[in-house]
Amino acid sequence: MNLTYIDAIREAQAHALRDDPRVFIYGQDIGAFGGAFKATKNLAKEFPGRVLDSPISEDAMVGLAVGAAIEGMRPIIEMQFADFSTVGFNQIVNQAATLFWRTNVPCPITVRLPFGGTSGGGPFHSQCIETIYAHYPGLIVLTPATVEDAYSMLLEAVALDDPVIFCEHKFLYRHLKAEKLPSEALPIGKARIAREGRDLTIVTYSAMVHEALEAATELAPEGWEIEIVDLRSVKPLDTDTVMASVARTGKLLCVGEAWPWGGVTAEIIARVASEGYGLLDAPPQRLNAKDTPVPYHPNLWTAHRPTARAVAAAARKLLRT
Amino acid sequence: MLQTVSDPKPATDSTSTRELQLSAFRFMLLARLLDDKFAALYRAGKIHGGVFLARGQEALSASIGVSLKKTDVFAPLIRDTAGRLAFGEPVLDAVRTYLGSPLGPMRGRDGNVHRGRPQEGYLPMISHLGAMISVVNGVLFARRLKKISGTVGAACIGDGATSTGAFHEALNQAAVEKLPLVLIVADNQYAYSTPTSFQFACENLADKAIGYGVESYSVDGTDLSVCLKVVGDAVAKARAGDGPQLIVAKLLRLCGHGEHDDASYVDPQLKSSPLGRDCLKVAEEFLLRQNWTDAATIAEWRGKFAREIEEAVGQVQREPAPDPFAENWLAISSEHLSETHTNHE
Ligand SMILES: Cc1ncc(C[n+]2csc(CCOP(=O)(O)OP(=O)(O)O)c2C)c(N)n1
Ligand SMILES: [Mg+2]
């Protein structure tokens, strides 16, 4: 078998629908059409009445999911693109994220966000907005970087009693392949050491894991051994694994495709600086996208987001301090 | 599609009509007295934050509460003291929420009108106007998936909130899915200080229903008899599978937006117009005229409700306040996924 990341997402949803009668999927064009990215291909046929087309109403889509969750269901909401979830932002952060805390009634909804940049995506089909969701109490925010994680984490997300923002990277959809789906996986909340090394720690997540891995390969012939921590979940954040890695390497570079102001990379640096200051041999660094909307043309886009080349350059600079 | 019911129908004197009106009236009276108590507590500085009253909207609100079954879904809004009580909310829940008691349904975490018991079909509003309608849709949608039929969901909203995107999305969603939603708009002429001329340019909000392909009704919100009839009919139609129903009731908010607001901006002409009638008085006069009850009985109810409220307030005031050291400060139910590095010990 040759399974892609998007196959894994489809299979996880099929699995959830098969195993749990409380699961249904609601989103735009996801029924007979199978979704803009085909994440629900044939699912409407396989599971009649449980994979349902919604109007273009992101606010009402999430509101409906919360109501269904109150009624004991486990809805999966597909946003056509993460960028459009901002139209449903209010229901996510004020309704879904506060329900359990206010009423003790859990809100087991999964909101799938096809996110991140692809060539030609432009300002409104490329955004990385995990940070704004992670900012709000009451949400779990996941960012799988591998086919295996896309599958196991989505299954776990649906089984969780809390609202999950599932950030699936569009660039990885057809780019990554795996032999088979995993039967075992790290649980949500645990980071993974994607590559071991002793000279520098790169902490990153989602598509940037692959840029970082490529950068590490580029740096290896120069004698540098780079350790890469794949966060997997940005909320909760596995600070212990990050800290342990920094303790081994003494140097920290955080890489994120999101915008630079605040966010996941800033959060990690804040935690390491305050709790692991003594572990650092050099000031911690971070690399993010530029602070502009995401540009359309590939020349601009590749310069806007961190690439393997940019990661390697930033790592080299830090290694030499 | 549009039905206008503004003239009181001659009252039928069947026992059920009479009992329903008397029942609704008692909830109106209880709600008015409870609101008056909250206002008094507010003036005495005993309430944290605002107090939002329902004065002038009790007839409409009670009509909703008594028209629903306990197995239905109800998402009340700011001015639904009467509807909440009629749907089954204990006076204690209201008092505990206003006073922030940890024994109340919101445990001091949320207050005033933001209260409910979601698992009993009584949804706790968030402040963001318009946001509860699609949540009601969701409960109804889920029940359909679970093959539970015969449920109705009622959502309340003000004239101002009809301008939100959430209102539009949710009503349209209910229409597309043909959900048994009854959406009740209390057109009380103001949204805080803003008159309706700044909210919509159509003649009557009920006309909007045509655009959504749903049935709608206009009703005089100051008249309990017609409110009961219209709301009851709409609930029955939704229950029978006729899809969403939109009710627009015209009335006047007989108080400030909240107790902090003297409402000096309210047009005096509106106050002296038929819209400015006090629905509680109108209902009382009607019941007396019909000889369905007498002044002594009403006085008895009044005394009984006042005592019930005093007792509830007394009890809650003796209850412990929320203890920050007893709080778990956890916003998710999956405790093993709580952030361990963010809550400072
Ligand atoms: C989305 C949103 N915007 C603004 C507010 C602040 N706000 C609270 S009540 C209110 C007026 C509401 O007017 P209306 O919908 O007519 O209801 P009424 O108070 O008259 O019952 C406003 C502006 C809010 N709660 N939600
Ligand atoms: Mg109003």
Image (cartoon, coloured by chain):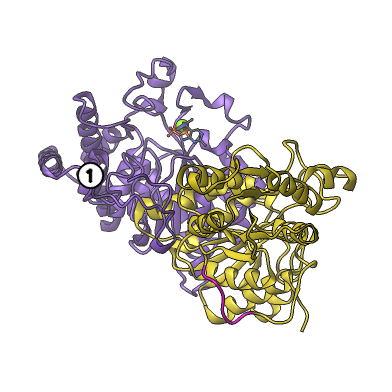
Chain colours: A yellow, B purple
> Is disc 1 surrounded by few (<14), some (14 to 19) or many (20+) residues within 10 Å?
some
User: Which amino acid, mark 1?
Assistant: Pro
Label 1 sits on residue? B322
Residue B80 lies in magenta, yes or no? no
Residue located at (31% from left, 52% from top): B328
The answer to whether residue B53 is left or right of residue A97 is left
Position in image of residue B105 (x %, y %): 28, 52
Q: Using residue A232 as the reference point, say whether residue B65 is left or right of it.
A: left
In the image, taking residue B188 as reference, residue B91 lies left or right, namely left
Q: Residue at x 56, y 41 (%)?
A: B206
Seen from the viewer's position, the closer of residues B12 and A237 is A237
Please say whether residue A125 is visible from this viewpoint.
no
Is residue A159 positioned above or below B50 on the image?
below
User: Taking A290 as reference, is B234 above or below it?
Assistant: below
Q: Residue at x 65, y 56 (%)?
A: A199
The range drawn in magenta is A182-187
Relative to A226, residue B223 above or below: above
Q: Is residue B57 above or below residue B166?
A: above
What residue appears at the point 77 percent right and 60 percent down from the top-left corner? Answer: A214
* Chain hosting mark 1: B
Question: In the image as oriented, which residue stretches furthest toward the bottom?
Answer: A1
Which quadrant holds residue B112? top left
Q: Is residue B146 left or right of residue A183?
A: left
